Amino acid sequence: MRLYNTLTRRLEELPPPPGPIRMYFCGPTVYARAHVGNAIPFVLPMWLRTWLRLRGYEATLVHNITDVNDKIYEAAPGKSAELAARATDWYFQDTADLGLGLPDLQPRATETIPQIVAFIEQLVERGFAYAVDGDVYFRVARDPEYGRLSRQKPDQMVEEEPSTLKEAPQDFALWKATKPGEDTSWDSPWGRGRPGWHIECSVMAEEAFGPVFEIHGGGLDLVFPHHENELAQSRALGHEFARIWMHNGMLRFTGEKMSKSLGNVATIRDALDEYGRETLLLFFLTGHWRKPLDFSEETMAQAAAQVERLRNVFRSPGEPGGDWAAFEAALEDDFNTPEALAVMHGWRDHDLLRRALDVFGLGSLAEQREAPAELVELAERRQAARAAKDFAEADRLRGEIAAAGWDVRDVAGGFQLVPR
């Protein structure tokens, strides 16, 4: 199997099975309900783990939670811990409803503080870091390979963390002294404080896998500074760290990257409630993981139509035959899900199609279920409300049907109820 490596800018061959293939993917910073773009670095490695295990690898996935961060302090002054706990629960609920199962480990930064402090102490002892007024900074100038991942040179980099305490503007924080209004802090050799963002992932990854592992992943926006700094920290201690770096393309909303700061956000919960898990997962399948993906009513309608086409295969008599080798080749070549999806659309073999859909958590499309009579009645009442232009009542009934695990869809001559 070949995967594109951001570090080398080429496709890299994985070792032959049984592996192991140890994967660490950066999870969310928890200060609000996760937007639908945050689902990609969860869904992608979950699919990849399923496929690798099917191919005979010993695949393990760690997906972390950043629950101490400046963004959390800013979102809930004096109550950041409560917000982080609540937002973590939201994230677990929303990703569970995607129906893909769980990563093997989901560590939280706040549960790893002693190990983070010990890691920073080693960097200070080796001269790669320095303490000043309760802060600790990494000396970027000590790392001749800094910038190798992002292809940026230290003297060309924008200062990410302005501070008059730093020796050089490119240096970044490993430990931050507690500031007024920050309600979480821990003891350290440098005084009360809390970790910087980048050190958390170096430590959590190495706690899980040791100083070298096969795959590190996350959104393309993490290449710099987050992943560049992770690599520098671990390299400073002589650790190889990740061999392959996977960076998924960003989700775009009306042509721009989706982000909380831009305000153009649909949450995972919004998308699940509006479209259902099957349509959302199939939408993610339509884009290559390294490319940007446009989220819109049009693209989601296209994904819903593809869901129905696949479901309809199981409503018709099956036809034996289908080229599993073509499906396999698509995924073995940089995990090309759009190509794999195109292959699947050509199949009428029920067993083969179900097997392929299971890789992506879509085996439910093979299930033929009749809607309960009470839901049919709700759908009929919704249709009547729409005819009377009582759209508020129609939306309420649609929500009640969705809460029962079904989607109601308007079709020529009536409606259709399909399981979510």
Image (spheres, rainbow, N blue to C red):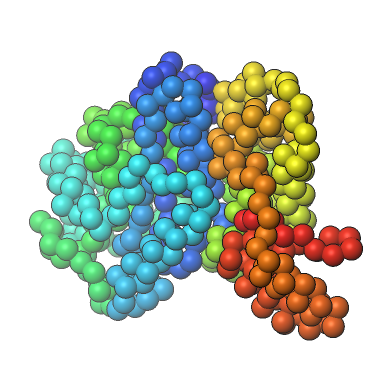
Looking at the image, which is closer to me, 137 or 100?
100
Looking at the image, how many numbered discs can be counted on the residues? 0
Q: Position of residue 407 (x, y in %)?
A: 68, 61
When the figure is inspected, residue 141 is found, relative to residue 391, above or below; the finding is above
For residue 58, which quarter of the picture? top left
Which residue is located at x 48 percent, y 23 percent?
55
371 sits left or right of 21 in the view: right
Q: Quadrant of residue 264?
A: bottom right
**What residue is at 75 percent from the left and 31 percent from the top?**
318
Q: Residue at x 71, y 28 (%)?
A: 349
Give x and y (percent) for residue 89: 39, 64
Looking at the image, residue 160 lies above or below residue 308: below
Q: Position of residue 66 (x, y in %)?
A: 35, 56
In the image, farthest residue toward the front: 373
Residue lying at 64% horizontally and 29% vertically, measured from the top left: 351
Q: Is residue 167 visible?
A: no
Residue 101 seen from this side: yes
Q: Measured from the top left, where is residue 164 in percent x and y?
A: 30, 62
Q: Nearer the viewer, residue 99 or 262?
A: 99
Give the residue furthest to the left. 189
As rendered, which of 175 and 21 lies closer to the eye? 21
Which picture quadrant has residue 159?
A: bottom left
Q: In which quadrant of the rendered image does the C terminus lie? A: bottom right
Q: Nearer the viewer, residue 212 or 138?
A: 212
Extreme right residue here? 413
Left or right of residue 312: residue 180? left
